[in-house]
C-alpha cells in the first residue's frame, strides 16, 4: 500500500475535487466518519459544514486540511467494506481517528485507491501537528496495515507511482477542453520523451496506440502552410474527435521544428534496436498460420504494436512496427527487404503454402498433393481477381483458405469412396 499526504490550504477546494469525481461517475463517497449523518444522505454543503464547524474553532492556524490517498496494487480487489475498514485503521494510527473525515473510492486509474479528506482542528480548537506526518506516523501505519491485511508492500508497488502511458479515455476526453488537454499532454509528453522515431508517420504510429494523433491539417490550409501542428484524439474508428490542442501549448514543445531535430538524432539510436524487432517478427511469422491478422495478434503479445496502412481500395501498401519493449518505431522496409508490407505478405503466403502442403502430404499421395496445390492456386487467383474494391487483403487470404478447406474435404471424400469401391471388386 502506498500512502500520499498533502496539506491543502482550502477544505472547499479538496471537497470540490472529490465531489466532482462523484458527479462524473469516476468516484464514490464510501463513508462519512464521525459525522451525524450517512455519506449517501448528505449533500455537498452538509459535508463542507461539518469541516468548517471544526475549522472555525481555530482562527490562528493557516492550514487546517489534510488530503490522503491510499493506493493498492492492481491485483488487490478490496471490497468497499474492506476499504472503509483500512481507512478507519489508518486514520486511527496517524492520530485522526476522532476527527470527521470522508472516504472516497476513485475509479479513474489502473489501480484501486481511496482518498480521505479531513480537518486538522480538534474539538477543543487545538491543531493536530502534521510536521513529518508522512515520514513518521504514516510510514509506521502503512507497514502495520500491510502486515495486518496481507497487502502488497509499498516497496514492491512503487511502479504504481510511475505508471506507463495510459491510453486516452475517449468519452471523458471529448467531454470538455480541460479533459482533452490533460489527456493529450500526458500521452504526447511521454511518447515524445521516451520513444525513438524518425518521421511524423512513425511518431503517429506510437501515438495512435494511445488514441492520439499529430495533425498538420490539409496542405492548402493555414496550419500546414505555417508549419503548424495540432494534436487530436482518435475515437475507436480512427476518427479525429474533441478539441484540437496546439503543439506549442504542450510542455515538451513537440512543434514541428523540435520533432525534426528528434528525427535526426534518433536515426543513430534506433539502429542497435532493430535486431530484437526483426527476431520477434520472424518468430511470430511461424505462429501466424499464414494470416496477417494472426501475425498482428502474435506481435501484440510480444509488446509490438502494428500499424497497417491501406489505400482507398483496402489494399495493404505499408506497415509500421512500434516495439513497446524498446520504445522504438520502425517502418517495415527500414528493417530490411523481408519486412516491407509486400515482402511480409509473400512470406505469409509461403508459410500458408507450407502448412497446406504438409497437410496434403498426410492426406494423399504426391500426385494428389500436386493436383490440390494447383487447384488451390487457381482458386486463390480467382478469389483475388473477383474480390470487390472494398475487400481487404485479410479477407482475400481468409476466403481463399476457406475455399481450399472445402476443396480438400471434397477430394478426401471422393478418394475414400474410390477406395471403398475397389474393395467391393
Image (cartoon, rainbow, N blue to C red):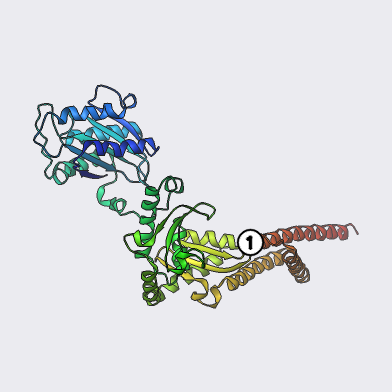
Helix, strand or loop for disc 1: helix
Question: Is 45 displayed left or right of 325 in the figure?
Answer: left
Instruction: Indicate the position of residue 340 as horizontal and vertical percent values.
Output: 55, 73
Instruction: Indicate the position of residue 270 as horizontal and vertical percent values.
Output: 40, 73
Count of numbered marks: 1
Residue on which the image places disc 1? 394
Question: Is 388 displayed left or right of 104 in the figure?
Answer: right
Question: Is 149 displayed left or right of 226 in the figure?
Answer: left
The residue nearer to you, when weighing 68 against 78, is 68
Question: Is 219 displayed left or right of 59 in the figure?
Answer: right
Residue drawn 53% across and 55% down? 239
Residue 322 shows in the view: no
The residue nearer to you, when weighing 278 against 209, is 209
Residue drawn 58% across and 60% down? 293
Instruction: Indicate the position of residue 188 as horizontal and vertical percent values.
Output: 38, 60
On-image quarter of the C terminus: bottom right
Estimate how packed mark 1 is, as few (under 14), some (14 to 19) or many (20 or more) residues with alpha carbons within 10 Å.
some
Residue 125 shows in the view: yes
The residue nearer to you, when weighing 85 against 271, is 271
In this rendering, the answer to whether 215 lies above or below 163 is below
Instruction: Tell me where residue 247 sits by quadrant.
Output: bottom left
On-image quarter of the N terminus: top left
Instruction: Indicate the position of residue 90 as horizontal and vertical percent values.
Output: 22, 36
The residue nearer to you, when weighing 206 against 224, is 224
In this rendering, the answer to whether 419 lies above or below 161 is below
Amino acid at each position: 500500500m502506498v500512502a500520499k499526504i498533502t496539506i491543502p490550504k482550502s477544505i472547499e477546494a479538496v471537497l470540490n475535487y472529490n465531489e466532482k469525481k462523484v458527479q462524473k461517475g469516476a468516484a464514490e463517497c464510501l463513508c462519512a466518519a464521525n459525522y451525524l449523518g450517512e455519506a449517501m444522505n448528505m449533500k455537498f454543503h452538509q459535508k463542507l459544514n461539518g469541516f468548517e464547524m471544526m475549522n472555525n474553532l481555530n482562527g490562528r492556524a493557516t492550514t487546517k486540511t489534510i488530503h490522503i490517498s491510499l493506493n493498492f496494487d492492481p491485483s488487490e480487489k478490496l471490497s468497499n467494506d474492506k476499504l472503509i475498514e483500512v481507512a478507519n485503521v489508518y486514520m486511527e494510527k496517524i492520530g485522526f481517528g476522532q476527527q470527521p473525515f470522508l472516504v472516497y473510492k476513485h475509479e479513474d486509474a489502473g489501480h484501486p485507491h481511496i482518498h480521505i479528506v479531513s480537518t486538522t482542528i480538534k474539538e477543543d480548537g487545538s491543531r493536530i501537528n502534521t510536521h513529518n506526518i508522512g515520514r513518521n506516523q504514516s510510514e509506521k501505519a502503512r507497514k502495520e496495515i500491510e502486515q495486518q491485511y496481507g497487502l502488497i508492500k509499498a516497496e514492491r508497488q512503487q511502479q504504481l507511482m510511475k505508471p506507463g502511458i495510459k491510453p486516452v479515455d475517449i468519452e471523458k476526453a471529448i467531454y470538455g477542453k480541460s479533459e482533452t488537454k490533460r489527456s493529450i499532454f500526458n500521452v504526447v509528453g511521454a511518447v515524445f520523451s521516451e520513444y525513438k522515431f524518425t518521421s511524423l508517420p512513425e511518431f503517429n504510429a506510437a501515438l495512435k496506440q494511445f488514441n492520439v494523433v499529430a495533425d498538420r491539417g490539409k496542405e492548402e490550409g493555414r496550419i500546414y502552410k505555417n508549419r503548424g501542428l495540432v494534436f487530436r484524439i482518435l475515437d475507436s474508428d480512427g476518427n479525429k474527435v474533441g478539441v484540437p490542442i496546439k503543439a506549442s501549448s504542450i510542455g515538451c514543445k513537440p512543434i514541428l521544428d523540435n520533432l525534426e531535430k528528434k528525427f535526426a538524432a534518433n536515426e543513430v539510436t534506433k539502429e542497435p534496436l532493430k535486431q530484437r524487432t526483426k527476431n520477434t517478427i520472424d518468430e511470430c511469422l511461424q505462429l501466424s498460420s499464414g494470416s496477417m491478422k494472426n501475425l498482428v495478434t502474435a506481435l501484440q503479445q510480444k509488446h509490438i504494436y502494428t500499424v497497417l496502412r491501406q489505400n482507398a481500395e483496402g489494399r495493404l501498401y505499408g506497415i509500421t512496427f512500434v516495439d513497446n519493449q524498446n520504445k522504438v518505431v520502425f517502418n517495415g522496409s527500414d528493417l530490411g527487404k523481408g519486412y516491407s508490407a509486400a515482402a511480409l505478405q509473400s512470406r505469409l503466403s509461403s508459410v500458408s503454402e507450407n502448412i497446406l502442403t504438409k497437410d496434403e502430404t498426410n492426406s494423399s499421395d504426391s500426385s494428389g498433393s500436386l493436383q490440390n496445390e494447383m487447384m488451390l492456386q487457381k482458386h486463390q487467383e480467382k478469389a483475388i481477381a473477383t474480390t470487390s474494391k472494398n475487400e481487404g487483403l485479410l479477407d482475400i487470404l481468409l476466403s481463399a483458405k476457406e475455399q481450399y478447406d472445402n476443396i480438400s474435404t471434397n477430394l478426401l471424400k471422393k478418394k475414400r469412396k474410390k477406395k471403398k469401391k475397389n474393395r467391393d471388386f
